Amino acid sequence: MLEISGLCAGYGKLPVLRDVSFSVSAGEIVLIAGENGAGKTTLLQTIGGLIRPTAGNIRFEGKDVAGTIPEKLVPAGLRLVLDGHRVFPELSVFDNIRLGAVASNTPKATFDGAVEQIFSVFPILKEKSRDKARSLSGGQQQMLALAQAFVSQPKVLLCDEPSLGLAIALMPPIMEFLRTWAKTGTAIVIVEQHVDLALTVADRALLMERGSIVFNGTADEFRTGGDKNA
Ligand SMILES: Nc1ncnc2c1ncn2[C@@H]1O[C@H](COP(=O)(O)OP(=O)(O)OP(=O)(O)O)[C@@H](O)[C@H]1O
Ligand SMILES: [Mg+2]
């Protein structure tokens, strides 16, 4: 579904990503772990079209999309959810969800079905659907950010630190939701500091250090390797 090879990117003359290669299949959840400043956000933003790579390929369904802008990637089914649960605070919860579908031209029937699913997983969004998004708690705004992405039914979801600023207790339902979502065939790449939590749903895990991938294996291998390194 997604195949990254030899990817390099940075900011101005500052190189950050160095020769990054990995792939993600349909229905698979891949965790990207790494310390602060390792380049995880830069990697997601480069795949999501916000940063133009200086070298390498990003193949999405076999087609090279390196350097393609998000306005084209989103309708094609590749979607980035930025960290810090960014939603439109002055719009209602429902309008925020609706905007998620506008960017991707989701057909009405698909949208209606997706909204039903979201409301059944996160009933609080249904209860508050007419309230302004700013009245939601941080955890609820993260659910909303995921709902926005979910209604566009992407083939690839890139999710940067869904736990950022949230009480850890709010995370299990969000991880569970990602697992259910992946079962529909969506390829999910998630960056998460709470590695143990993310490993409960991830199929594979990558470790980034200074812009490079230094480990790529199954979630079990990652756990075992982590214990050895500790
Ligand atoms: N907008 C920017 N302009 C210049 N340098 C940047 C910019 N954003 C990030 N960097 C630098 O790029 C490197 C990688 O940062 P990045 O945000 O991708 O790391 P990260 O792994 O997501 O870290 P964190 O865990 O803190 O989110 C760091 O050295 C950072 O200082
Ligand atoms: Mg980051």
Image: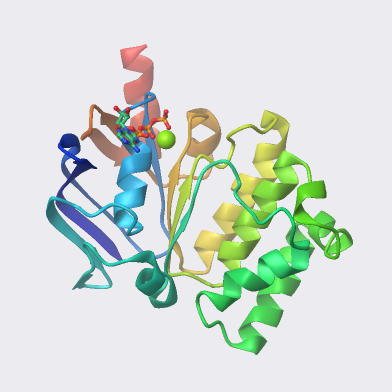
Q: Residue furthest right?
A: 127
Question: From the viewer's perspective, is 5 left or right of 84?
Answer: left
136 up-or-down from 115: above or below: above
Q: Residue furthest top?
A: 230
218 up-or-down from 51: above or below: above
Residue 110: x and y, percent?
62, 83
Nearer the observer, 148 or 71: 71
Residue 58: x and y, percent?
21, 60
Q: Residue at x 56, y 62 (%)?
A: 181
Q: Residue at x 78, y 63 (%)?
A: 92
Question: From the viewer's perspective, is 75 left or right of 178?
Answer: left
Residue 188, by quadrant, is: bottom left
- Does any portion of residue 39 appear in the rendered image? yes
Question: From the viewer's perspective, is 108 left or right of 223?
Answer: right
Residue 61, by quadrant, is: bottom left
Question: From the viewer's perspective, is 129 left or right of 86?
Answer: right
